[in-house]
Image (cartoon, coloured by chain):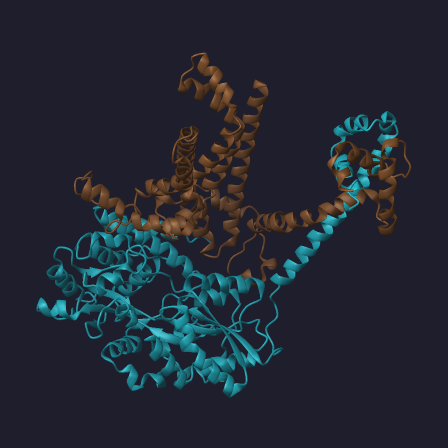
Amino acid sequence: MTSANVSPGTTRAGGAAGGRRGRPGGPGAAGGAPTARARRPRRRLRLPPRLLPYLLLAPAVVAELVVHVVPIAVGVWMSFRDLTLFYIRDWAKAPGKGLGNYRIAVDFDAAIGKDLLGSFLVTVGVTVLAVGLSWLLGTAAAILMQERFRGRGLLRAAFLVPYALPVYAAVMTWGFLFQRDTGMVDHVLVDQLHLTGGDRPFWLIGGNSFWALLTVIVWRSWPFAFLVLMAGLQNVPRDLYEASALDGAGVWRQIRHITLPALRPVNQVLVLVLFLWTFNDFNTPFVLFGKAAPDGGDLVSLHIYQTSFITWNFGAGSAMSVLLLLFLLLVTAVYLIATSRRRTARA
Amino acid sequence: MRHPTSPASGHNATSHSATSHSATSSGEPPATAPAPGARRRARRRPRRTATALTAGIAGGILLAAAACGGGTGSGGNGSPKTLTYWASNQGTDIAADQRVLGPELAKFEKQSGIKVKLEVVPWTDLLNRILAATTSGQGPDVLNIGNTWSASLQATGGLLPFDAKTIAQVGGAQRFVPAALASAGAKGKDPAAVPLYSLAYGLYYNKKMFADAKLDPPKTWQEMVDDGHRLTKGNVHGIAVEGASIPENVHAAFNIGQMYGADFFTPDGKPQFATPQAVAAIKSYVGLLGTDKIAAPGNAEYSANQSLNDFATGKAAMLMWQATTSGFTNLGMKPGAWGVVPIPAPSPTPPGGRDVTSMVAGINIAVFKNTDNRDGALKFVKFMTSDDEQKILNKAYGSLPSVTAAQNDPAFDTADLKVFKDILAAHAAPLPQVPSESQFETAVGTAMKELFADAAAGRPLTDDRIKSKLEAAQQQMAK
């Protein structure tokens, strides 16, 4: 029977006859034999024929509900409640607060709203720079690794190490490197290169924390860009390069007119994924800075955790999270519409 | 095995634009003709089924969730033979705790016939685990809590209140050190727990460094600063501080704040962080690094006990820390190489200043309200706070017993512990026992971390700057 599965014609016919119309012996001579066979189990199970696909989908639907939809719904519900420590034991009875939690979060004149806005702007800055740099490094490395040379495999593997390391271990190591008194970064910058005029800068507190965080995030995420783009490049036909070379195109022209357009669909997804990952990054600042990140490294997920969940104000935390979700939805939607419209226009 | 139905009919039901195509390919043009009505019917039926299915599942989940959330049972004695105990991590690691507690739990099982299932929970997880247990109603029977969380956890209603009758079951309130019992819940309410291990802050000093410089341990804040100046040379500093640690910062703010008469909450529990007293206290503490410069600038990013390390390895001559022995010896310091005195207060005493030099630090033991072995749990609390167990456990951990009678054991008469016993008996006060205490710790501790960062970067430490930081911290305490 497996052979019928492989051949699309037979499968379609059988499905059309048995599945859609649900009547034995329908027209369609081609599907006669499979229909007859498909009828028997139906009679045994006594299932309405159109229910079967839904039954088969049901486990996935249940899993999706349990894993995604219900927690999101509960989170949204919590954002309208005054769910503080006084109610967590019996949280179903937390009193309603209407839009109160949202009002606090977007009141940019008060401390909470102002801090949230500041953290949001820092996150936008880190995200834009980190996605840009990761993409640039990933593209450059992928293109350079295209040509065959000795040790290419080794180098490719080495490039992927940051991506393969467990995030906690890697970021803790960065934390040690960035320590002021004993860290290697200051040792190299100050003691060996004498770049700072004898001044030992702090990296884990104060304003420099922005650059420390950016460094770690780019270090962690560019190998992913590299991996995806390298895979994408395998699909670019080599003869295009050969033909263009015959026409006298240089390397830059080839990159601009062959490589990048060919990578467009890959890039569309890659940039979106990198954006979402960086914007939502919690682990990196948490491990690098601890619970209370300095302003320059205060990514919004960590900020929400610190201002609400540590203080057990789950309603306010949920409201901020819902706002974050809406923002990300909006950006994603606009991005997808814009990029796919451009593609249709080109096609 | 009956494959033909499954993939194809799923295909049809979902994408109708594809039907004509598939029909043509299977060579049956009339198939599209009778379709519209049938297809509409076909479409509606599964959708209704699917909706019902979805609704049923969602409803089921919500019901289950609601059942979890409704932690209304007030406990009983359903399973009188077992107890689950969440112990906080008091020793150097979890295995050390299991070695200390294991024989004692066996002793309790022999006495009472109740088997105690022990789980040592690391500090990083403990509060989250307790919150999760409170939310779900599924938790341990007996648990340790940091005593500063008492009022917050009390407000959740997840812990069994020790009213007069309950506390009598564990031996009575008069057995406990009063200051320790005062840090087991909000004033005027039944305690949410009883104290188990007690600790206090003191000023540790390196005896050899002080002797070499011909100095005596400081008795006033100014003496401490002067000594610090004398001892600061090259890579060695007078004192080490844990400038990026939220709890250490807030504990220092409280300890020194008491000397200046600072209250971070009004008597009715409203936050008031930016008082002149609090500004003065924080200025003198952060000033150790910023203005007095007797602490190394790098201390501003310490948050993983590096200051303990600096003191133990002779890079700093003084350290304000909670009672510890193993903390130093593990880092290679020999017992007897350090001495301890109360944290020195400013002299003359500022107006309103109190004769308090330390918070009451320590661990409380509580009973989870949803326990199904209430009597057994209370028996266990009574066992853990009995004189004998208090002596054994506090000896093992280097802390002080929280019951007065056990403190008289000669084991707690070492030079160090005598100092801490005195502090706890007469010069210690509990941190504010208000529900929003954890918020206070986060907000003020973070503000001080930022002030340390500013000071280390060379920015001047003015009253206005401290005041505005504290005001901003207070604004975060929204209702």
Residue A4 position (above or below residue A92): above
Residue B124 position (above or below residue A229): below
Residue A323 is situated, as x and y percent measured from the top left of the image, at 52, 42
What residue occupies the far top of the structure in this picture? Answer: A247
Task: Choose top left, top right, bottom left or bottom right for residue B121.
Answer: bottom left
Task: Choose top left, top right, bottom left or bottom right for residue B75.
Answer: bottom right
In the image, taking residue A171 as reference, residue B349 lies left or right, namely: left
What residue occupies the far right of the structure in this picture? Answer: A25
Q: How many marks?
A: 0
Which of A33 and B76 lies nearest the eye of the viewer?
Answer: A33
Please say whether residue B289 is visible from this viewpoint. Answer: yes
Tell me which residue sits at (16%, 71%) in the image.
B207
Residue A260 is situated, as x and y percent measured from the top left of the image, at 47, 24
In the image, taking residue B197 as reference, residue A21 lies left or right, namely: right
Tell me which residue sits at (46%, 46%) in the image.
A301
Which of A231 and B12 lies nearest the eye of the viewer?
Answer: A231
In the image, taking residue B437 as reference, residue A89 lies left or right, namely: right
What is the letter of the brown chain? A
Task: Choose top left, top right, bottom left or bottom right for residue A345.
Answer: top right
What is the letter of the cyan chain? B
Please say whether residue B401 is visible from this viewpoint. Answer: no
What residue occupies the far bottom of the structure in this picture? Answer: B111
Tell me which residue sits at (38%, 62%) in the image.
B266
Which of A2 and A308 lies nearest the eye of the viewer?
Answer: A2
Residue A344 is situated, as x and y percent measured from the top left of the image, at 59, 21
Residue A156 is situated, as x and y percent measured from the top left of the image, at 42, 37
Residue B56 position (above or below residue B166): above
